[in-house]
Image: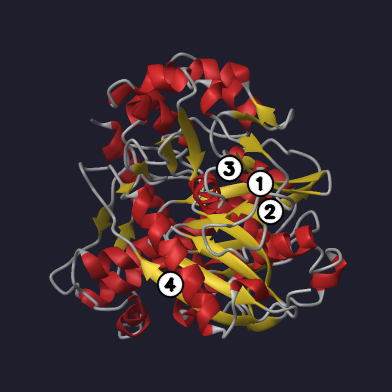
Amino acid sequence: MSQYILALDQGTTSSRSLVFDHAGHIVALAQKEFTQHYPQPGWVEHDPEEILATQLATARDAVAQAGLTMADIAGIGITNQRETAVVWDRATGKAIHNAIVWQDRRTADYCDGLRREGHTEDIRQRTGLEIDAYFSGTKVRWILDHVDGARSRAERGELAFGTIDSWLIWHLTGGTVHATDPSNASRTLLFNLHDLAWDPAMLDLLSVPAAMLPEVRPSSGDFGTATALSPDAPPIAGVAGDQQSALFGQQCTRPGMVKNTYGTGCFMLMNTGTKAVMSRHRLLTTVAWQIGGETHYALEGSIFMGGATVQWLRDELDMISDSAEIEALAAAVPDSDGVVLVPAFAGLGTPHWNGHARGTLFGLTRGSGKAHLARAALDAIAHQTVDVVRAMEADAGVAIPELRVDGGATVNNLLMQTQSDLLNISVVRPEITETTALGAAYLAGLGVGFWSNTADIQSQWAAERTFSPQLDDAERKTADHRWQRAIRATLNWAEDR
């Protein structure tokens, strides 16, 4: 058997490809950033062709870096930014509009209308989701309503819809496979959590023709052959949305285990086993993965602005030239000196679900400087995570004893220590923090027999460092009180429109 697995990690700001060996170690990594488009305030788009080009390029680069050919790859796993929506022409394979990104808020008013019409609880029961512009369903509707002739073409079966995994699968297989997996399907507002199938009532409500939809296949299994990469193409054998993939990569395979990914956004998932647990605290219920006929579910808290907050300081304010510089800048001061940043640039997710909230700064004085703002940005990432943990503990009825963390921002020791301080629990960083890609690799490897079963990969997880709380209770309570004041003020500003 070929000795390696290739994972395609298609994220919000970059496309990455990683080669893993049988021990779960990274052999090679290639990455390319791509353009972010902001046509109007609150709108975020990607060029699907650029996503495809960067993903194919990094796949070839990673294999070449490892000194391999595609013949050495046993299987390909795909993980992706989840709720970003693409509609393309089945005949040409060309997108009819830019991809509308998960951060995009253009359908927020439409979502408000669905709430006013009383659909909230029915949608929650069917899909496990909140009514929010975050999810794919309303984005597809918008494309069909705003591109000339799109709706009639979709009804005739000429157009295909997919999240980014489907877009990549289509093109990797030369247009022979139009498919997704349940973890991605469960993020669309169109998928019934209990039937594990597209929901006719939701398709009718959002006016999305069934003819557009991809086939839903198990997360570990057959998604066709990646002939676009090579004549010696390996099979695509694993697919999962990025956060569910990270949950699997962190080996949170038992009910009650929790991970938080610090990427463009921050996403916390708790494995709830084979039961779809409906939240009482505005968490999302989602499919974690489907393997061998068994479906695992998760509770999820979604934070829209995590590492993207640091990117804002870099790209829009020119405070730093590289995201890695944020730690030293923030550490130049002992604390934020009362400055609070609520990074609601794309609205607020869990537990508030307010699409009209916007980024807000509080507590500025004449003495406030760049270092205070940098410290406030890191504090904000940690505070948002605390809010999600509280909701998750309330739903689960148990205290979360530790938080497994992954994603690019976990290299920031100051952020990880702040997170532990504010949560008052241990924060555990694994040896391999590329757990999103690793999860996709594991799913693909299981799909082709590279690994025999989940027990075969359990032993590969190991902690690199554990952060323990050092803040006293009084300081923790003061910081939390100040954050909650800022959140209330941000929400009040959003509602008083």
**CA distance separating discs 2 and 4:** 29 Å
Quadrant assignment, res 231:
bottom right
Name the kind of residue labelled 3 in the image: Thr
Residue that badge 3 annotates: 176
Q: Are marks 4 and 3 in contact (CB under 8 Å)?
A: no
Q: Earlier in the sequence, mark 4 or mark 1?
A: 4
Q: Which residue is drawn at 31% across and 50% down?
A: 345
Q: Earlier in the sequence, mark 2 or mark 4?
A: 4
Residue that badge 4 annotates: 31
The quadrant the N terminus occupies is bottom right
| Circle 1 crowding by C-alpha within 10 Å: few under 14, some 14–19, many from 20 | many
Name the kind of residue labelled 2 in the image: Met
On screen, residue 256 versus residue 439, left or right, reads right
Q: Do the residues labelled 2 and 1 touch (CB within 8 Å)?
A: yes
Residue that badge 2 annotates: 270
Q: Do the residues labelled 4 and 1 touch (CB within 8 Å)?
A: no
Where disc 1 sits, the SS reads: strand
**CA distance separating discs 3 and 1:** 34 Å
Q: Which of marks 2 and 3 is nearer the N terminus?
A: 3
Residue that badge 1 annotates: 299
**CA distance separating discs 4 and 3:** 27 Å
| Circle 2 crowding by C-alpha within 10 Å: few under 14, some 14–19, many from 20 | many
**CA distance separating discs 4 and 1:** 30 Å
Residue 391 x, y percent position in the rendering: 60, 47
Nearer the observer, disc 3 or disc 1? 3
Q: Which residue is drawn at 30% across and 78% down?
A: 322
Residue 256 x, y percent position in the rendering: 76, 55
